[in-house]
Amino acid sequence: MKKFFLLAATICSLNAFAQINMPQPSTTQKLTQAFGMGSIELTYSRPNINGRSLLKENSDLAPLNKLWRTGANAATRMKFTDNVTIGGKRLDTGSYVLYTIPGKDTWEVILNKGLTNWGTDGYKEAEDVVRFKVKADKAAGNTETFTMQFANITFESCDLNIIWGGTSVRIPISTNVKDRLRAQVEKALSAEKVNPNAYYPAANFYYEWDKDMTKALNAATKATEVNQNGFWIFLLKAKIQRDMGDKVGAKASAEKCIELATTAKNDEYVKLGSELIKKL
């Protein structure tokens, strides 16, 4: 009987142990960054230093001059839903594996097609899509957990920063949005029957992107004719007129913005219109 109870207790103990959910020693992080006309998805595992040697010859973690999975566990993946340029090469949309070869002063960055690879196992140089070098800088502090993050994001450029220990690496990424936007705008405005809703985004494009104030003013004026209550349109028109040196016209458009925004109870645009007039 005692043996029976001992066996039962052992089985219960094993079952309880089997249900223990242990945390990952190297946590997985997935980042999605809107960029260009699409997005960049980054999936990687984040090891901690835990007192081990890092970024040295034959170190425990990320030894210098050796192929590294750029994280822990499975190889780090990057997915682009818009065409980008990285390392001077234009990449099509799709998924890639991100490998690096850390160096003392520079890191070699590799995008590879080996999506089924576990870490560096299965890596083939023939499957490299792009390979280039970036500078390794000294980080501001000491980062315990391996970190990757997107920074310095503009319409057509961003940086993927790698930070670990006292080292920081910046990988520049770019895309061409301006030319594609221009093509869309010109196609919309040259249609046999122009969609009235196309004038405001066209004015925005010519003002913010192309810096063509004549085209911007023309599109903004047409947009105000289509939507005579669009206070936001009159504010854009006021900015364009201001930048063209037409202070009288800018003031009139800003006053119209304030009038319409007041009726619409939009305090933000009342404030913006007022500030524009003050700075004329």
Image: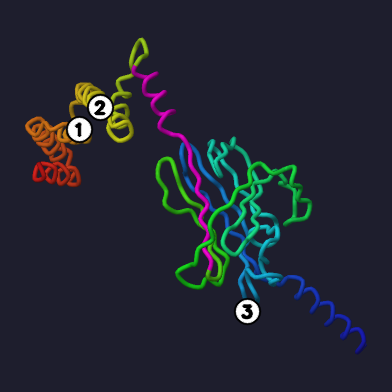
Q: Which amino acid type is shown beneath numbered disc 1?
A: Ile
Identify the residue at the far front of this view. 105
Instruction: Report the quarter where the C terminus lies.
Output: top left
- Give the vertical position of 139 relative to 267 (above or below): below
Marks 2 and 1: in contact by CB < 8 Å? yes
Which residue: 17% across, 44% down? Answer: 272
- Residue that carries the numbered disc 2 in the rendered image: 216
User: What's drawn in magenta, residue-wise?
Assistant: 167-189
Residue 240 badge? 1
Examine the image and state in which quarter residue 105 appears.
bottom right
Of callouts 2 and 3, which one flags the residue occurring earlier in the amino acid sequence?
A: 3
Marks 3 and 2: in contact by CB < 8 Å? no
Q: Is residue 172 magenta?
A: yes
Of callouts 1 and 2, which one flags the residue occurring earlier in the amino acid sequence?
A: 2
Q: Judging from the image, what secondary structure is the residue with disc 2 in?
A: helix
Along the horizontal axis of the image, is 176 left or right of 219? right
Q: Judging from the image, what secondary structure is the residue with disc 1 in?
A: helix
